[in-house]
Amino acid sequence: MTEPAWRSDFPLLANRRDMVYLDNAATTQKPKAVLDALARYYRGTNANVHRGAHRLSDEATAAFEAARETLARRINARSSREVLWTRGTTEAINLVAAAHGPLAVGDGDRILITEMEHHSNIVPWQQLCQRTGAVLKAARVLPSGEIDRDDFAAKLEEQPRIVSISHVSNALGTVNDLSSLVPSAKAVGATVVVDGAQAVAHFDIDVQALGCDFYAFSGHKMYGPTGIGVLYGREELLEEMPPWQSGGEMIERVRIEETTYATLPFKFEAGTPDISGAIGLAAAVDYLDDLDGEAIEAHEASLLAYASASLNQVEGLRIVGTARAKGPVVSFLLDGSHPHDVGTLLDQQGVAVRTGHHCAMPLMDALGVAGTVRASFSLYNSLEDIDKLSGAVRTARTML
Ligand code: PLP
């Protein structure tokens, strides 16, 4: 068995041969191209953006705005004005809830999510409900880990003003069929928000084809740096939303009596942004653009199939989440043992996975489990990595 060609692009994997990294849904490792872009920026271009009277600032601004163009192209936004830099998915969803939420919902209005959401796609909506009197509803999840479409349809009949759903479940890997979910939510007039945190590393995203109003994602889950992410928003909606944070950078003219705001996208970017993060994320996109997306998808699908088959052969192991369409994630339980204990035993054998509720407690409640062990794969993982995982799980079983 050979290692995927891409593996050698990731220095950490060569530096840490003591472990197999299978916690990619939490964060991915960074290719050399991203590390180099960060170093190049700090060594040769570092200055504050949008305000300089000198050439270094102009260069930093040009690189920062070129990064926005790169991201806009990657997700097929109509314009880079629709690409807002955020700290990540969490901040992006908070931005929508804070700035669009009160325009969309009032007392008694419905907001619809699903039981499979990450806490960052639940709690901001709860807070919006507390502020406005809106009511949060969650479509049920079936034991397979798929959205119960009958329940989703029934809850759409209540005409929610906002529908916010994940593209891919971080806990189970379920890929939600946005090609039917988004149009059905748009048909009742809802604003549609997609949490794309777990999709961007694995699939090409086309926000226009998806037809959603907002799409949120994190750079660090797609080989970019931590601390940077994107909120895509439809320009008409962004135009009518008030700023959500205020200060420098987001203004046009400030008087003590009143302030007028900058145009898009700057209206939503108060303060010095994460300049290097944006440039690093654009480097990650350039890196991905240079690879064969279909080959990566096929590779990750083969990792998923191989892992599912080999783990299914371990006695007493149950895979949680058996959706037909899955990203490269396998969540599982070992009979009679706590996921944390399994995780510790795997770590002792050099296999890094995530254990617990995966920031999806309502999903765990719906499935009747306290948590799971989650192995999540990436383009640099190999079939040998999965052999090590299943070997370590078998050994762990004998020790529990
Ligand atoms: N949504 C999903 C589906 C996630 O998997 C995560 C992170 O694990 C988030 C949102 C939050 O992302 P971040 O912590 O980068 O803001």
Image (tube, grey):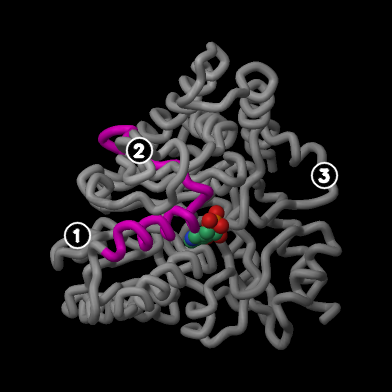
For marks 3 and 2 on the same chain, the one whose residue lies earlier in the sequence:
3
Left or right of 320 in this view: 250? left
CA–CA distance between discs 3 and 1? 46 Å
Q: Earlier in the sequence, mark 3 or mark 1?
A: 3
- Looking at the rendered image, the quarter that the N terminus falls into is top right
Q: Is residue 311 above or below residue 53?
A: below
Q: Residue at x 69, y 20 (%)?
A: 43
Give the x, y percent position of residue 102.
28, 65
Q: Is residue 5 left or right of residue 72?
A: right
**Magenta stretch in the rendered image:** 76-102
Residue 285 picture location, percent across and down? 49, 33
Left or right: 202 as drawn, with respect to 97: right
Residue 399 badge: none
The x, y position of residue 126, in whole percent, is 41, 75
SS at mark 2 in the image? loop
Q: Where's residue 90, x and y in %?
A: 49, 58
Q: Is residue 76 visible?
A: no
Q: In front of the other: label 1 or label 2?
A: 2
Residue located beneath label 1 in the image: 183
Q: What residue is drawn where x is 51% and y is 27%?
A: 49
Q: Label 1's element?
A: helix
Which amino acid does the dot numbered 2 rest on? Pro
- Please identify the quadrant where the C terminus is shown: bottom right
Disc 1 residue type (three-letter): Pro
Magenta stretch: dominant SS? helix
Which residue is the site of mark 2? 265
